[in-house]
Amino acid sequence: MTKSIDEIESAEKQIRALQQDVDYTVREYPVEVVVGKYLTGLDDNTNEIFVPEYQRDLIWDDSRQSKFIESLLIGLPIPYIFAADAGNEDETLSGRLEIIDGTQRLRTLASFLLNSLELRGLEKLTALNGFTYRDLPPSRQRRFNRITLRMIELTERADEETRRDMFDRINTGSVRLNDMESRRGRLPGPFVALVKDLAQDNLFRLLAPVSGPAEKRFEREELVARFFAYLDEFEDFGRTEAGKVVSDFVDDYTSRMNAQLEAEGTGGASETRLRREWSNMLEFVRQNYPSGFTKSPNARTTPRVRFEAIGVGSALALRENPNPPGVSQIPNWINGDTFRKETTSDAANNRNRVLSRIKFVRDRLLTA
């Protein structure tokens, strides 16, 4: 059916109005500049270009990383990197760029320039299989460093609604379900239902703020599920091949807890214990950590690694002593360099890092 002139004009007017809400710039940077902006300040979480917490578990395998480097070396076009000035989400992030799409590419480039990636499985540049960046002649290194990457940067002037809408749209169809979204669909049961319930706790929401897009993708539930998995079994994380990936570790725990809660029935001993430890931990954090699980009182996001360290470490201490003797020392380390390094590493989910940050908090709380 043919549209009337009024309908066509109305549609065109709406398109123009919404186009004005999208404020972005297109930039081009050499590889070495982009990687430098990512690596400089990475250890203390002040890098200009950063990977948001919810994407840090995502990483290509060596084969896929190698193929990406091969594409750059032979001059194939690659997609734009999509980033956003994060100042509207958290004032402490003002001027820094959050990667929305392109995390894997950025981390692959960093890994290659740091000589952590050995090329393998190349089908075009077969002579480069087994090479690292340092194996390339200096002339080729310089040419690689000058390869231009294109970046679409959503500016700070774009309002929050537009930012969130663009985030959702750019990820629709291009990003797999995250861990909690997948878990909800694959592993329904009483433990998943309990996690959903506890994630709505008002005190938890106050102590652990999350961004709008992350909340839509069940970030709070992911934090709760990780809390219990690490609380009960963190020493087992990474012991086996299957347990080296956080999602697999939490999935395995979820399956067993679903079965256990199902067998015990509503209000059983396990559910009662989980609710009690969750409640006790939150109240302890409220009383003793001025910024809750965040880095500062005004922060609007909660880093997973920080939540895990404070939440699980505190709960483990409470298991051993309801009145941990080291509480008075919290101000001496909570904003210190050592704890910051424990909770900002990009290799946040290997076994050593997980155990180290959790034990850091637990042991300090239990030491007078």
Image: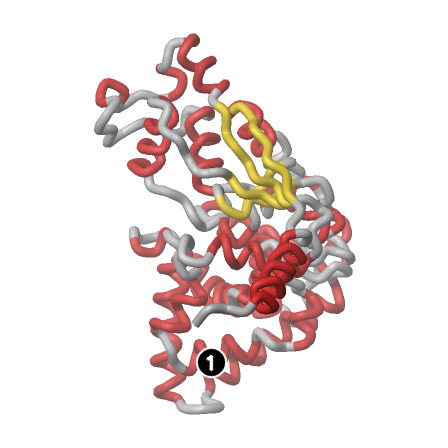
Query: Is residue 181 visible in this depiction of the protein?
Result: yes
Q: Could you tell me which residue is drawn at 39 percent across and 88 percent down?
A: 264
Location of the N terminus (image quadrant): bottom left
Query: Is residue 227 visible in this depiction of the protein?
Result: no
Asked if residue 21 lies left or right of residue 1, the reply is right
Q: Could you tell me which residue is drawn at 27 percent across and 29 percent down?
A: 120
Amino acid identity at mark 1: Ala
Location of the C terminus (image quadrant): bottom right
Seen from the viewer's position, the closer of residues 140 and 195 is 140
Q: Position of residue 164 (x, y in %)?
A: 60, 58
Q: Position of residue 135 (x, y in %)?
A: 35, 15
* Residue 345 sits above or below residue 21 on the image: above
Seen from the viewer's position, the closer of residues 279 and 15 is 15
Seen from the viewer's position, the closer of residues 235 and 299 is 299
Residue 21 quadrant:
bottom right
| Residue tagged 1 | 193
Asked if residue 30 lies left or right of residue 281, the reply is left
* Residue 363 sits above or below residue 81 on the image: below
Q: How is the image coloured?
A: secondary structure
Which residue is farthest bottom? 266
Q: Position of residue 145 (x, y in %)?
A: 48, 19
Q: Could you tell me which residue is drawn at 52 percent across and 32 percent down?
A: 150
Element assignment for label 1: helix
Q: Could you tell me which residue is drawn at 65 percent across and 36 percent down?
A: 48
* Residue 120 sits above or below residue 159 on the image: above
Residue 37 quadrant:
top right
Seen from the viewer's position, the closer of residues 208 and 106 is 106
